[in-house]
Image (spheres, rainbow, N blue to C red):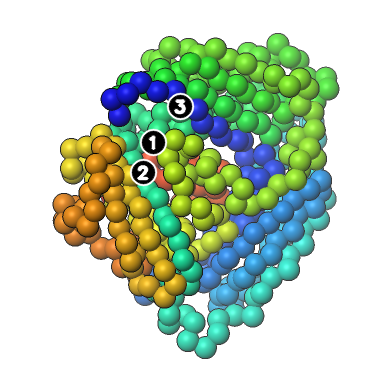
Amino acid sequence: MNATRIETAEHVLPGHPDKLCDAAVDAVVEFIRSGDESNPADPGGQCGLEACAVFDEIHLTGRIATTPERHRTLDIPSLVRRTYREAGYGVDAAGYLWGPDPDRLKVTARLCDNGFQDGERESRHLSDDQAVCIGYARNDPGTGYLPPAHWLARRIARNLFDLRLEKGAGEVGPDGKVLVTVRTDGMAWTPLRVSISLHHHEGSDWLLLRRFAEEAVEQACTGLPTPAVALNGAGMFVLGGPNGDNGLSGKKLVVDAYGPTVPIGGGAWSGKDLRKVDRLGGLLARSLALQAVARCGVREALVTLEYTPGCDRPVGISALLDGREEGDSLLRRLGDPEVRNQAVWEKYAAWDGALPELARWGHQVGGVGGEGRPVQNRFSD
């Protein structure tokens, strides 16, 4: 934390093909979750989904198990088309059609959806897989307790998304990428440069695109030095979204986590219900890291949880607090918080947020909100 170093991180807009897939599968998880996970005593529905998209087609595969009543009302094509519209595809306010057109989207699903097997619901407090889950927190509420480059890339991306709705109709498309480089010196940090790739059409006004990008960066860097901004360094970006590249869920794991300066466990979050240990363990690890910076007087916490198949809680918990190994004493220092799978799930089961929004903007507590402020929600302590 005391050494000066260069950090780089990226974020992508909701219209990016990989993020379309993440939001699509999380829309299905959200539908299942909102139907039968509202009662913490109920083991709830089960989802383990993946998606791939190209051109005007998207294909979902995996496992769904829920109540017969909820299954009968599940309309996967409608949920997926809504995520495309929310990302900005379709006809915008200026009448320009950004394809693929959600109304003509071909949605196919090959799912194992034969319901719960005997005894399966009763054993959902046990891990059904192995997992390594990482939680990180930096004691800086100004960056949502996240690494600065990672936080700033998200904030610029969110500004680009909001500005497109506000003033980008007919000119700016739904797809895009942000790459940010900052210099950190302990808890201080300075933005150095930003690269932005903006989706547009052949007739878009390049001066407008430039002003658009600079405004998003200036808003995100309020109170900070304004970094150098590069726009569309590779030239024209007219084939955006699934028309320009294949999309896969679970492909932006570093973007979903804490950026490249923090190790990731490796498991995807999107497409999985909140009982899956990749997702449940990730939430718990982040919660423990936040508690560590709040209660232990440290500037930086990195928590690692180990799960094995059949366990009802992490079989291993370790932490680095300001670079020092904490070992088994972390929970004692935090007042022995509950870490059993069932108890952790009950904490989050009734959360009233939207999982597709987490898929688009980051799964951690203290992510960036619509005005660049840290999000505080039921996932926080």
Q: CA distance from mark 3 to mark 2?
A: 16 Å
Residue at point 52% right, 71% down?
45
Label 1 sits on a secondary structure element that is loop
Note whether 263 is above or below 47 in the view shown.
Answer: above
Name above or below for residue 198 compared with residue 347.
Answer: above
* Residue on which the image places disc 1: 146
65 above or below 166?
below
Separation (CA) of disc 2 from disc 1: 7 Å
Residue 158: x %, y % from top left: 54, 32
Residue lying farthest to the bottom in this orientation: 118
Kind of residue sitting beneath label 3: Glu
Tell me residue 183's x, y (percent).
Answer: 42, 20
Q: CA distance from mark 1 to mark 3?
A: 12 Å
Q: Is residue 248 in sight in this rendering? A: yes
Going from N to C along the chain, the mark reached first, 3 or 2, is: 3
Do callouts 2 and 1 mark residues in contact (Cβ within 8 Å)? yes
Given the image, on which type of amino acid does mark 2 rest? Answer: Tyr
Residue sitting at 73 percent across and 14 percent down? Answer: 206
Name the N-terminal-most of marks 2 and 1: 2
Residue 43: mark in rendering: none
